[in-house]
Image (tube, rainbow, N blue to C red):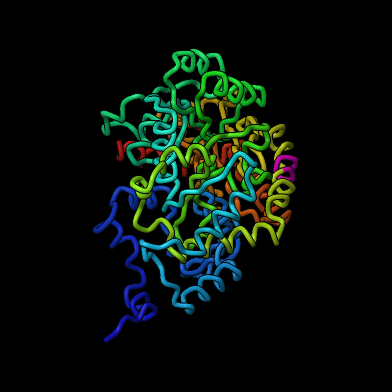
């Protein structure tokens, strides 16, 4: 018989949600159907998705930041085809292959000169796991500090450093030695660091859950305090790195020199999972300190050839198409175009972020008529209003966005870095339309809100 991918997909077309519900996760299917996100996507290109009816969708999630160079990029596709056709000898294990060295060299060339070694992983969470292990071993200290609202992954190490109660509930006890400090509070950090037993402080330069930011002076104090107390600075750049914020690394906005950087998502180009932990030579050599310890931290798929090719091709596209600078320019265009909507609509409170990592904050209106509607939704489920924005953006205008976290009225935008002024204009016009209906007390908008209320009550 043989395997026929196209034939198999044609034969089983339309079974997506049935199979997913039966064999993977029925609750996710319920969520997608309740918010009207149950589309059958058949193709993707650049910043757009296409469904089985030929409808076009502007993808402002980019796979949670994975597709920074856009979907189906021809350079990346050709590189992977070339690698497969070359029959590269992957995962020999007892080997030191060329491509991992080349990708490590390329990453280190994009970091500050205190970085000297790279460990490759399969995901952002695995990169964070490596960072936590290396930090503890290198410092011989037991404790790790993380921030409230932080998100570093969902395996047990990163989950132990997760600032979101919704992810931690029911999974304890967590790894010992982890403590939370408020994001942006350098005094609270100093009180913990002064105990002298903290191996690492791990943080996101811009927090993914909520697109929360801290002032530049906070990061300056973080750097100084960690140096003072001998604590390693770990910058989690899994989502913010590789140009997302208009700099190669988001910590560069604040003049920081972390001891460890974690990255993933965009490095993959969207095809082959890959992550990396980048650190100083001293930290790496402390862990890999002898021949007996050469494999003391490892993973079966860590240096697979296709992942290395994907990473190299992705970095090449970022450079060749000047996507870091484009992200900065397009991000500024978003902020400028969205500012008048903040002034125009009571629901819309602020815009924050850097580059193409943007948070739209919604909140309680001033006028009584609108405030009563807003409170009705919030009483049903806190943060439900933001889904009221996300839903019509998708259903009316074909724009895929997300609520930035549980129980918060923040809509998060993570467009591909290839987006231009055309996508800015289209999104702003669509958001203007949705907000205008909300302010006019449109039955279409608030009927969608009632649907979400019912779905929320049924899931609780």
Residue at image point 71% right, 34% down: 344
Residue located farthest toward the left when viewing the structure as drawn: 22
Instruction: State which quarter of the image contains the C terminus.
Output: top left
Q: Is residue 80 visible?
A: yes
Instruction: State which quarter of the image contains the N terminus.
Output: bottom left
Q: Is residue 430 visible?
A: no
Vertical side of 233 occupied by 190: above or below:
above
* Position in image of residue 105 (x %, y %): 58, 54
* Position in image of residue 226 (x %, y %): 55, 23
- Residue 134 falls within the magenta-colored stretch: no
Residue at image point 59% right, 38% down: 359
Vertical side of 173 occupied by 5: above or below:
below
Numbered-mark total: 0
Q: Nearer the viewer, residue 316 or 7?
A: 316
Q: Nearer the viewer, residue 93 or 217?
A: 93
Q: Nearer the viewer, residue 268 or 308?
A: 308
112 horizontally vs 403: left or right: right
Chief secondary structure of the magenta portion: helix
Vertical side of 113 occupied by 381: above or below:
above
Q: Quadrant of residue 416?
A: bottom right
What stretch of residues is rendered in magenta? 332-336
435 horizontally vs 132: left or right: right
* Position in image of residue 419 (x %, y %): 67, 56
Q: Nearer the viewer, residue 297 or 442?
A: 297
Residue located farthest toward the bottom when viewing the structure as drawn: 1
* Position in image of residue 448 (x %, y %): 47, 44
């Amino acid at each position: 018989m043989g395997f026929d991918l196209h034939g198999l997909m044609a034969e089983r077309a339309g079974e997506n949600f049935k199979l997913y519900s039966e064999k993977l996760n029925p609750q996710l299917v319920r969520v997608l159907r309740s918010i009207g996100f149950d589309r059958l996507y058949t193709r993707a290109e650049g910043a757009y998705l296409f469904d089985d009816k030929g409808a076009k969708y502007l993808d402002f999630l980019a796979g949670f930041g994975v597709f920074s160079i856009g979907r189906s990029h021809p350079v990346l596709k050709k590189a992977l085809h070339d690698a497969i056709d070359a029959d590269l000898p992957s995962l020999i294990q007892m080997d030191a292959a060329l491509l991992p060295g080349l990708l490590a060299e390329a990453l280190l060339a994009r970091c500050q000169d205190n970085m000297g070694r790279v460990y490759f992983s399969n995901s952002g969470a695995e990169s964070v796991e490596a960072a936590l292990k290396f930090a503890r071993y290198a410092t011989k200290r037991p404790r790790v500090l993380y921030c409230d609202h932080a998100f570093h992954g969902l395996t047990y190490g990163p989950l132990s450093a997760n600032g979101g109660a919704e992810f931690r509930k029911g999974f304890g006890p967590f790894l010992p030695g982890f403590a939370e400090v408020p994001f942006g509070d350098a005094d609270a950090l100093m009180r913990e660091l002064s105990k002298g037993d903290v191996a690492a402080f791990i943080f996101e330069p811009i927090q993914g859950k909520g697109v929360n930011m801290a002032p530049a002076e906070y990061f300056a104090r973080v750097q100084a305090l960690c140096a003072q107390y001998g604590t390693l600075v770990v910058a989690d750049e899994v989502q913010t790195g590789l140009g997302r914020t208009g700099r190669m690394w988001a910590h560069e906005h604040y003049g920081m020199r972390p001891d460890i950087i974690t990255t993933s998502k965009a490095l993959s180009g969207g095809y082959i999972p890959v992550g990396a932990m980048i650190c100083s030579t001293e930290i790496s050599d402390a862990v890999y300190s002898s021949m007996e310890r050469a494999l003391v931290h490892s993973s079966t798929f860590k240096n697979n050839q296709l992942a290395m090719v994907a990473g190299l091709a992705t970095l090449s596209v970022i450079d060749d198409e000047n996507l870091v600078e484009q992200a900065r320019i397009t991000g500024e265009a978003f902020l400028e175009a969205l500012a008048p909507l903040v002034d125009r609509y009571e629901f819309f409170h602020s815009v924050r972020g850097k580059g193409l990592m943007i948070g739209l904050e919604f909140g309680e209106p001033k006028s009584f008529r609108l405030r009563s509607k807003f409170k009705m939704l919030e009483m049903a489920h806190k943060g439900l209003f933001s889904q009221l924005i996300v839903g019509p953006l998708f259903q009316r205008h074909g724009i895929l966005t997300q609520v930035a976290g549980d129980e918060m009225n923040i809509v998060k935008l993570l467009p591909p870095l290839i987006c231009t002024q055309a996508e800015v204009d289209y999104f702003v016009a669509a958001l203007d339309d949705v907000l205008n209906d909300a302010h006019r007390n449109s039955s279409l908008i608030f009927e969608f809100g009632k649907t979400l209320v019912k779905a929320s009550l049924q899931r609780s």
